[in-house]
Image (cartoon, helix red, strand yellow):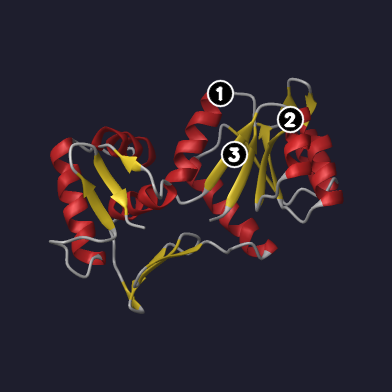
């Protein structure tokens, strides 16, 4: 799964982006300052860095400079709207792209996919038995044939994938779909979407092995 390091000190942005990107199939690790970002990059590796220019203990330029000197990780700067200096400085430093705040999530997602493709870091193909999910291309196949999912069915599947091994309550699934899709989804609607998703990806929807029911607790992506 594609791993994103989010370096941002605004908790509202962190919470929203984390929820949104996880719903799209990305693993997100967030830090709120320059020093901790440098420490994390020294110890761990990521496929992409989303980097705020202004940080409480410094700025994003030092993080970008370190990443470009010591890793092959692409960087997208999150800049204040209309701040031309930040944009130019970031690109001169080797940043792969930038997006101004406030930004539209779908536009950011498009930028992320584009940068990952250019950097050759699109190893986000997940196999669930006979089902294969490519979260970068947004393609789901079963036994080699395309599976056509609605937007909410696809996001529901990505939510399970991103929380593989964990039991997800109905309230957690509803929260994820509401935050990510911005559509009204109630408890009855969730039941319908799970049933539809199972009918498309399970060999035997009446005895599901990919999305299993954990009685009294919720649902879980099968091992």
Mark number displayed over residue 36:
2
Return the disc, 1 or 3, that comes first in the chain's sequence. Answer: 1
Q: Are marks 3 and 2 in contact (CB under 8 Å)?
A: no
Q: At which x and y percent is residue 189?
A: 16, 43
Q: How many marks?
A: 3
Q: Is residue 184 left or right of residue 84?
A: left
Residue 11, disc: 1
Q: Which numbered disc, 3 or 2, marks the residue that appears first in the sequence?
A: 3
In which quarter of the view is residue 118 placed? bottom right
Foreground: 96 or 189? 189
- Kindly state the secondary structure of the residue where label 2 is placed: helix
- Tag shown at residue 29: 3
Q: Is residue 191 left or right of residue 67?
A: left
For residue 202, what is the image quadrant? bottom left
Binning the other alpha carbons within 10 Å of mark 1 as few (below 14), some (14 to 19) or many (20 upward) gives few
Above or below for 124 versus 71: below
* Secondary element type, mark 3: strand
Cα gap from disc 3 to disc 2, whole angstroms = 12 Å
> Where residue 196 sits in the image (x, y, percent)?
18, 57
Residue 139: which numbered mark, if any? none
Q: Nearer the viewer, mark 1 or mark 3?
A: 3
Question: Quick check: can you spot residue 184?
Answer: no
Rendered residue at 29%/60% (across/down)? 210
> At which x and y percent is residue 105?
49, 41
Q: CA distance from mark 1 to mark 2?
A: 16 Å
């Amino acid at each position: 799964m594609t791993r994103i390091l989010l370096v941002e000190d605004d908790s509202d942005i962190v919470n929203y982006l984390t929820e949104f990107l996880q719903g799209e199939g990305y693993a997100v690790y967030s830090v709120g300052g320059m020093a901790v970002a440098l420490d994390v990059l020294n110890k761990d590796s990521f496929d992409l860095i989303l980097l705020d220019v202004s940080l409480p203990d410094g700025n994003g330029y030092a993080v970008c400079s370190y990443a470009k000197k010591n890793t092959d990780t692409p960087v997208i700067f999150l800049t204040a709207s209309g701040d031309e200096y930040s944009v130019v400085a970031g690109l001169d430093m080797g940043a792969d792209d930038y997006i101004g705040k406030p930004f539209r999530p779908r536009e950011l997602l498009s930028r992320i996919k584009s940068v990952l493709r250019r950097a050759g870091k699109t190893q986000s193909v997940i196999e669930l038995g006979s089902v294969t999910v490519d979260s970068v291309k947004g393609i789901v196949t079963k036994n080699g044939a395309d599976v056509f999912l609605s937007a909410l069915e696809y996001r529901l599947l990505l939510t399970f994938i991103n929380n593989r091994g964990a039991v997800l309550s109905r309230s957690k699934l509803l929260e994820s779909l509401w935050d990510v899709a911005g559509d009204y989804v109630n408890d009855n609607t969730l039941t319908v979407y799970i049933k539809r998703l199972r009918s498309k990806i399970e060999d035997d929807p009446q005895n599901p092995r990919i999305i299993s029911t954990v009685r009294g607790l919720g649902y879980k992506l099968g091992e």
